[in-house]
Image: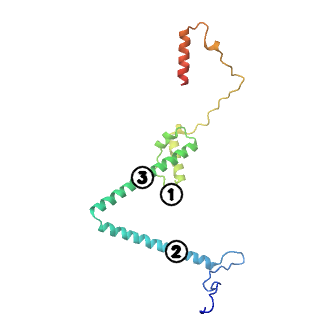
Amino acid sequence: MTTPNTPPSTEPDQSTAPDTSTTTDGTASDSRESSETSLKNEMAKYRRQAKEAQTELDKLRAATATDAEKAVAAARAEGAAEYAAKWRSAVLQNAALSALTDRGVEAPGLAVRALDLEGVDIDDHGKVDDTALTAAIENLLRRWPQLAPRGAPPLPTVSGDTQTRVTKDQVVKKDMTDQDVDQLLRYVLRSNS
């Protein structure tokens, strides 16, 4: 307790200080965990109440809205639904294309069009259900085995031993006329451009 002549104490009041006692193994006490749990429950309760209040407010606005306001709200809802459908389709196709490419499917663009993505779920953050996507890809590869990866083609082997330089005599034959040389040069210059 302070009087007008004494300055206030800078030490925290022990009755309102949080319980920071620890047990012998160094963990926080149960009272801290229980208070944290109770705070989380209270926050969830307030979130639920706020959501209910927002729903009630939306209902009141819809009941008192004019026909023009209702038309605008319907157009916004339709636009939002269309956007959500396009977004879902784009996210699913990109995830499927990436998964098909990672698997080494022969024609991933064609395979995406043939893939049945109806059973694949997406959360609000764009995270695709990988198990459902993998199952859809497996189903596609069972139906269309020609899309399955065939393994890597053999790489060509080139060594300097078999390479030779092309000489002018090999390209221009001695019995070629000037017109033949002109046609050959036109052909070569046309193919290089």
Q: Which residue is mark 2?
A: 41
Label 3 residue SS? helix
Q: Amino acid at mark 3?
A: Ala
State if disc 3 and disc 1 touch (CB < 8 Å). Answer: no
| Nearest to the observer: residue 95 or residue 72 | 72
Q: Percent from the top left, x then y, of residue 167?
A: 66, 15
Q: Which residue is mark 1?
A: 125
Give me the C-alpha separation between circle 3 and circle 2.
35 Å
Label 2 residue SS? helix
Q: Amino acid at mark 1?
A: His
User: Is 38 left, or right, of 63 in this rendering?
Assistant: right
Q: Residue at x 52, y 42 (%)?
A: 141
State if disc 1 and disc 2 touch (CB < 8 Å). Answer: no
Above or below residue 46? Residue 144 is: above
Q: Which residue is mark 3?
A: 85
Q: Percent from the top left, x then y, of residue 152?
A: 62, 36
Q: Amino acid at mark 2?
A: Asn
User: Is 61 left, or right, of 142 in this rendering?
Assistant: left
Instruction: Tell me the crowding category of disc 1: few under 14, some 14 to 19, or many 20 or more residues within 10 angstroms, Cα based.
Output: few
Instruction: Tell me the crowding category of disc 2: few under 14, some 14 to 19, or many 20 or more residues within 10 angstroms, Cα based.
Output: few
* Residue 149, quarter of picture: top right
